[in-house]
Image (cartoon, rainbow, N blue to C red):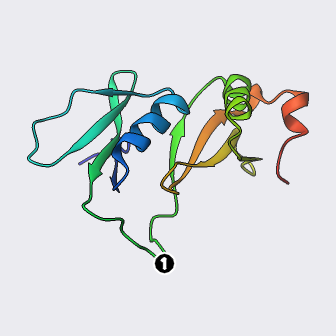
Amino acid sequence: MQLNRLDHVNIITSNLDAMIAWYTDVLGMAAGERPPFPFPGAWMYAGDHAVVHLVVADEERQSIEPKIQHFAITASGLAAFVARLDERGIDFGMNTVPAFPIVQVNIFDCDGNHIHIDFPADELDDALKARLDI
């Protein structure tokens, strides 16, 4: 057996409409086709791939120390993404990965899930370098 790549992340939420709006507005995903499961939810697509699966919980779940710290999505267009976050007033952190050509932009969705969006380091211009968290 050969594992290839993580296919999707499944997130349980009691805020389905807000989560769909956030993933659409902030990450540019689109709600798309989803199997007719007997429970409500949405599949959020990046291009042709359903990257985030949202499933509705009847009540908000609590976790003091979650075992999954974050999930990551590879992207391009770092400057445009940072501008999008700035326009929406969304707080974020940005750092480089030691010894790897990656810039990570760390954000939290409206349910508090940590996501980092990974960009190629060659997209880091001087203006963005000044915004790095060291």
Q: Residue at x 22, y 27 (%)?
A: 33
Residue 70, position in %: x, y? 52, 57
Residue 73, position in %: x, y? 51, 39
Q: Is residue 29 above or below residue 73?
A: above
Q: Is residue 121 above or below residue 70?
A: above
Quadrant for residue 122, please give it: top right
Residue 78 horizontal side relative to residue 61, left or right? right
Residue 37 horizontal side relative to residue 28, left or right? left
In the image, 1 versus 124, the foreground residue is 124
Give SS at disc 1. loop
Q: Is residue 28 above or below residue 111?
A: above
Residue 58 horizontal side relative to residue 94, left or right? left
Q: Residue furthest bottom?
A: 64
Judging by the rendered image, the residue that carries numbered circle 1 is 64
In the image, 17 versus 46, the foreground residue is 17
Evaluate whether residue 8 shows in this view: no
Quadrant for residue 4, please give it: top left
In the image, 128 versus 59, the foreground residue is 59
Amino acid at pointer 1: Ile
Q: Is residue 88 above or below residue 93?
A: above
Evaluate whether residue 23 shows in this view: yes
Residue 45, position in %: x, y? 36, 29
Residue 43, position in %: x, y? 29, 36
Q: Residue at x 76, y 48 (%)?
A: 95
Total number of numbered labels? 1
Q: Residue at x 67, y 28 (%)?
A: 84
In the image, 58 versus 92, the foreground residue is 58
User: Badge 1: few (under 14), some or many (20 or more) residues near its Cα, within 10 Å?
Assistant: few
Q: Quadrant of the C terminus?
A: bottom right
Residue 110 horizontal side relative to residue 61, left or right? right
